[in-house]
Amino acid sequence: MAQSLSLRFVAQESIYLPERDAVDITAVAGGRMVPCLATRAAMALLGCDRGDGPDRMIQKFEHHRPMLERAAAYKHRLRHHRARGAVTIDARDLCALFGFRGN
């Protein structure tokens, strides 16, 4: 099995994707772009309410960005990718990796 390349986060700003109800940042592994998404469930675990809009979700994401990047890098190393190579961080990931309780 080939070794997985490390993620390098290149996007300075996160973006809210309404069609996925998630916050997206971009990383690169080798020469390949790897979208990394934090779901609304993950963001709720970090303090977002159901009614919070995109600005609040991005604000919370940026506050917790180092932790979310670590979670994405960990899932990438395990090759836990979804459609089109995206790494998705959900509430279960944060509970398992960082000991959060919830969902």
Image (cartoon, rainbow, N blue to C red):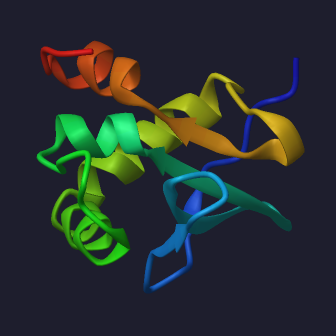
The number of numbered discs placed on residues in the rendered structure image is: 0
Residue farthest to the bottom, as pictured: 12
Q: Residue 67, percent across and down?
A: 26, 47
Residue 4 is drawn in which quadrant?
A: top right
Indicate left or right for 88 with 35 as reference.
Answer: left
Q: For this rendering, which residue is in front, 43 or 82? A: 43
| Image location of residue 5, percent across then percent down | 71, 46
The residue that appears at 29% across and 21% down in the rendered structure is: 97
Q: In this view, does 42 lie to the left or right of 12?
A: left
Q: Which residue is drawn at 32% across and 71% down?
A: 58
Of residues 98 and 90, the one drawn nearer to the viewer in this rendering: 90
Viewer-proximal residue, 28 or 55? 55
Q: Quadrant where the C terminus lies?
A: top left
Q: Residue at x 34, y 48 (%)?
A: 68
Report the side of 4 relative to 87 (left or right): right
Q: Residue furthest front?
A: 51
Among the 4 quarters of the image, the one containing residue 60: bottom left
**In the rendered image, which quarter contains the N terminus?**
top right
Q: Residue 4, relative to residue 101: is it above or below? A: below
Horizontal and vertical percent for residue 72? 49, 43
Against 30, is 4 above or below? Answer: above
Judging depth in this view, the residue of 91 and 74 nearest the camera is 91
- Position above or below: 59 against 7: below
Residue pictured at 45% horizontal, 75% vertical: 14
